[in-house]
Amino acid sequence: MNTQQGPHDNAPATEPRPYDAIIIGAGMSGMYQLHRLKELGLNALVLEAGTGVGGTWYWNKYPGARFDSESWSYGYSFSEEVLKEWSWSENFAGQPEIERYCNFVADKMDLKPHIRFNSRVAASHYQDVDKTWRTELTDGTVFHSRYLITGVGLLSAPTMPKFEGVDDFEGTWCHTGLWPKSGIDFANKRVAVIGTGASGIQAIQEIAKSASQLTVFQRRPNWCTPLHNAPIDAAEMEDIRSRYPEIFAHCKRTAACFIHTHDPRSTLEVSEEERNEFWEYLYNTPGFGIWQGNFHDIHTNREANSLISDFIADKIRQRVDDPKVAEMLIPKDHGFGTRRVPQETGYFECFNQANVELVGVLDTPIERITPKGIRTTERDYEFDVIIYATGFDAITGSFDRIDIRGSGGRTLREEWSSGPTTFIGMMVKDFPNMFMVMGPHGALGNQPRSIEHNVDWIARTIGTMEDRGLATVRPRPEAVAEWHAFVAQKAIGLLTNEVDSWMTGVNLNVKGKEKRGLVRYSGSAPDYRARCEAVITGGFRELAFDPPLDDARDAAAQAAQ
């Protein structure tokens, strides 16, 4: 167990502690944000609910958890020292290696002394009187800071299904996103996995290797494609190191910051033979190529999407022995790539094993969890272990779990009651000096590439405020409205936005999130970065400062005279 702790792990404080900045979360966002604020000479503290760094890669310890972006494109790019010293062992690293990497970076950058572990934030309220943020932990400890920065992650609020009897089960059970550090032994056990999203697919592949019986309760089939993972030897790692500048520059140019980017050709402009040859090539290459490096119109043209969906469906039929099971595993309610595409290694072959059974919950719904297992409309099952791979309350869920209040005491929940509104995904109207790394309506894609951009923009904005003696900043209402309209315009025509998924704000396990909404930016990353850069080069016209920026400039000019 990781017992590394920061300098503030004692009893609840009786007096508020002043900081320049409080950062919520010690994942990849919070770690880099802390590093940048340290460079600015600010006194910053990270509050982390867990006992170690890593965020997603700290909590998600389930078997099979790993990158689905290439390791060498996913790590941090900001430190030459880290790039030179760290060696990845696989093209798509597993969770233990990723967690070691996060600790390596934290130690190399001397971050842990500025992180308070075992510190779950309950509330953070803006104080209009003294223009500070009052942040309170669940244990009652209170901190005051000028700036509040959230690094809470897009997928860090696990959700359980609305089944009766969950607590009645007498065996072992857990959610994939809250995996016990001690692990779970599946050998000679009867195991149920509920859910076949990315986490479920990764876990099923590993659990099937040792469980005496694995029953997969599929709530909704997902398109998924081969990961094609491979080890990285010393010579290859040296070659990767020599190409890091080229790799990261390429990622900046692509639509979603992956090494893959869309082919400019249309699906329909090439012959059937050429099309199928291209798809065979993509299907047999590593990673997201067949999703992110495909013909550009598979995401917007229904006929093109239907053709690639048929291609992937045929691949599933070829890999699954039982035709009935194969058809159960083929999505019928959405086309390929319109939801995030999980990557797999032998997932479909699991269902050829004698010890693996697939149950379609759409046909035979789960009625309840019983002391011995699971009851469907068809029969009772007995299990030793139940794994809930039921996903997360994505994008806004992590914010909803904290009582965040801005100027005048308005809650963030109230502000976002009709759907989130932000400025460039990093700021919220009437929440002064609050910044979000990877907030709603920000660019997603390859996360660390987007994280580094967001953190750098926030640090540059705060640095400007520090240099000019500005107390607070908030986005102007008209800028928020303009950004929301821009995000809405970018969503038009994408088939993804016609499908229920976490990327469209749908979560049937969470009240009020049963319908689609505008929760993410759907345009390209280069367009997003250009818009953010224009804010800075344009003199921050979209932001309101206290004292106003013009007043500060006038005061500086008068002082110079």
Image (cartoon, grey):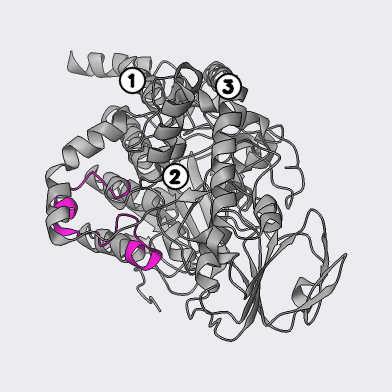
Q: Nearer the viewer, residue 45 or 253?
A: 253
From what the image shows, is residue 469 above or below residue 85? above
Picture residue at 61% right of the left edge, 30% below the top: 306
Instruction: Tell me how far mark 2 sits from mark 1, CA to CA.
Output: 24 Å
Residue to which mark 3 is pinned:
301
The residue range painted magenta reads 74-98
Name the residue that disc number 2 marks. 149
189 or 45, which lies in front? 189
Residue for point 30% across, 58% down: 230
How much space separates mark 1 and mark 3, taking CA atoms?
A: 52 Å
Q: Quadrant of the N terminus?
A: bottom left
Q: Is residue 51 above or below residue 411?
A: below
Look at the image and say whether residue 158 sits in the magenta stretch. Answer: no
Q: Residue at x 45, y 48 (%)?
A: 151
Say whether disc 3 or disc 2 marks the residue closer to the N-terminus: 2
Of the two numbered discs 2 and 1 on the same chain, state the one appearing first in sequence. Answer: 2
- Quadrant containing the C terminus in the rendered view: top left
For label 3, the crowd category at 10 Å Cα-Cα, with few meaning under 14, some 14 to 19 and many 20 or more, is: some
Q: Is residue 291 above or below residue 178?
A: above
Determine the image quadrant of residue 26.
bottom left
